[in-house]
């Protein structure tokens, strides 16, 4: 069961995401039902460690196993989608792409259940032009921290 707590005035989510890097590019994804690009990852399950959750999500979304380098950001976000308020805590892990993942090319599509995920490698410089979340990564991608940093984002 995902850690997603619904209340009368909003929802709290606990998530993990992968900052997958290769040669000055970042792997981003988009689903047909979402109007922006974002990072691979998803919600942590009850009783599951963040690293286990990240590995599970990457297997589900990318059908590959990758090893996180290090935790770069702990981000607390406040936003609204379709009149629903969200409070989200997400752990962003830096990772290198595997040769298997790179062999899929600059853009590829994967189907996970009823969802179709579209992936593409984007040059760091091009992120500023995209509707991409998390927004803070558009600038921070150029100087990722070696130690975890805490970030708060308010988009309401």
Image (tube, grey):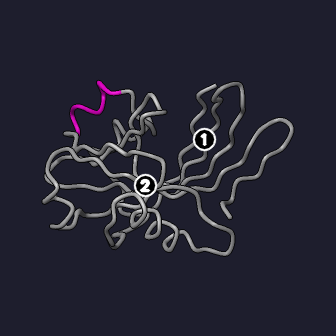
Name which of mark 2 and mark 1 comes first in the sequence.
Answer: 1
Classify 135 as above or below 120: above
> What segment carries the magenta color?
124-130
Across and down, in percent, residue 147 comes to: 42, 63
Name the residue: 18% across, 55% down: 22
Image quadrant where residue 131 sits: top left
Q: Main secondary structure of the magenta part?
A: helix
Can you identify the residue that label 1 sits on? 77
Residue 98 or residue 19, whichever sits in front: 98
Name the residue: 66% across, 26% down: 82
- State yes or no: discs 2 and 1 in contact (Cβ < 8 Å): no
Name the residue: 45% across, 46% down: 115
Q: Which mark is residue 143?
A: none
Where disc 2 sits, the SS reads strand
Left or right: residue 56 versus residue 103 is right
Can you identify the residue that label 2 sits on? 112
Across and down, in percent, residue 110 comes to: 32, 52
Crowding around mark 2 (Cα neighbors within 10 Å: few <14, some 14 to 19, many 20+) is few
């Amino acid at each position: 069961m995902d850690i997603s707590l619904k209340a009368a005035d909003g929802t709290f989510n606990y998530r993990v995401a992968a900052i997958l890097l290769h040669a000055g590019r970042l792997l981003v994804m988009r689903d047909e039902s979402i109007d922006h690009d974002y990072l691979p990852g998803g919600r942590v399950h009850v009783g599951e460690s963040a690293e286990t959750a990240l590995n599970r999500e990457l297997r589900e979304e990318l059908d590959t196993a990758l090893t996180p380098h290090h935790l770069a950001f702990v981000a607390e976000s406040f936003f609204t989608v379709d009149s629903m308020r969200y409070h989200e805590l997400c752990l962003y892990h830096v990772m290198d792409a595997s040769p298997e993942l790179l062999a899929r090319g600059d853009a590829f599509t994967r189907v996970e259940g009823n969802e179709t995920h579209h992936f593409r490698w984007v040059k760091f410089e091009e992120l500023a032009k995209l509707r991409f979340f998390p927004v803070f990564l558009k600038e921070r991608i150029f100087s990722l921290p070696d130690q975890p940093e805490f970030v708060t984002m308010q988009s309401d």
